[in-house]
Amino acid sequence: MPLTVNTVPGSSPTPQIVSPATVVQRVKKGGNPSATLAIAYTDPILNIDQTGLSFRQRQGSSGPEFSFDTGTLKLTLRQEVLVSNALSACAQQKWIAHEQGHVTDNQQLLGQLDAAIRSDPTLRPIFIGQTWQPRTAFAATGQTIQNAVGAIFFKLTAQAVALRDTRAEYMRVQRDILKNCPGPFVYEVNPGDNLSQIADFFYGQASAWKSIYNANQSVIGNDPDKIFVGQKLTIPPTP
């Protein structure tokens, strides 16, 4: 086939220990603008190298034209793992183990890109049909390739995240931390948080907010609806 898709999975990243706000900001940038509760995140970044693609030219009835001829589209995966520095060292390791699953998922899904690119309705006419286009559209075609490949990759990673980041998996990690990590589990309040959301995140029960409030009343005060960004709340091992 004229087109070769070369995927490079890259190495496993060293986790970065960052502020809770940085984790939330990266999650939002990664495609979840409503995210507020986030303490760890894996960011997959795909480098799309088109320099190995060759195009042919001809003089068409309306002027110079080009079409894809042959060559290699090189796709290199780079990943960053971010973990909140508000977590204890033990809790950080529990979440790093979870994020390693995302790292592996992203590396494995690279094997799906070749078929997805060849069947994509935007890319198929370029690479498989080798459609002739006006020479003036050359730069735009390069951008189309960039955008379409990026969209394919984003869709695949989003599907992989949805399969791994289930409520059951979150509850497993949180129960592991609350049961096996020494010392209290401290959560730092992020923008948009409320006690019901936090209780749902840790226990799977929004109604368990009272347990968190009772454990932190000296920090929160008399009104459980008024928690503030940066407050550090102790999460009881059980609701």
Image (cartoon, rainbow, N blue to C red):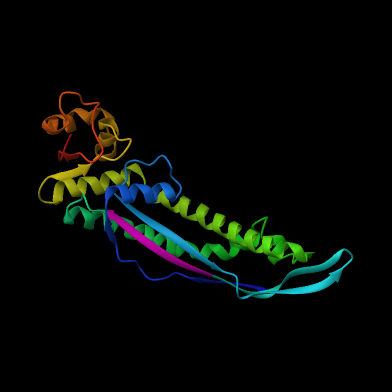
**Position above or below: 10 against 84:** below
Residue at screen point 33% across, 59% down: 81
Q: What stretch is highlighted in magenta?
A: 75-83
Of residues 108 and 222, which is closer to you in this image?
222
Q: Quadrant of residue 63?
A: bottom right
Residue at screen point 67% across, 56% down: 122
Taking the image as shown, residue 136 lies to the left or right of residue 219, namely: right
Q: How many labels does the image show?
A: 0
Q: Where is residue 17 in the image (x, y as percent from the top left)?
A: 26, 58
Q: Position of residue 161 (x, y in %)?
A: 42, 51
Residue at screen point 11% across, 31% down: 218
**Position above or below: 172 against 62:** above
Q: Does the magenta stretch include residue 76?
A: yes
**Position above or below: 24 against 53:** above
Residue at screen point 75% across, 63% down: 136
> In which quadrant will I find the N terminus?
bottom right
| Residue 1 in view here | no
Magenta span: predominant SS is strand
Of residues 117 and 213, which is closer to you in this image?
213
Taking the image as shown, residue 230 lies to the left or right of residue 49, namely: left
Taking the image as shown, residue 206 lies to the left or right of residue 59, namely: left
Q: Quadrant of residue 36?
A: top left
Of residues 41 and 230, which is closer to you in this image?
230
Q: Does the magenta stretch include residue 78?
A: yes
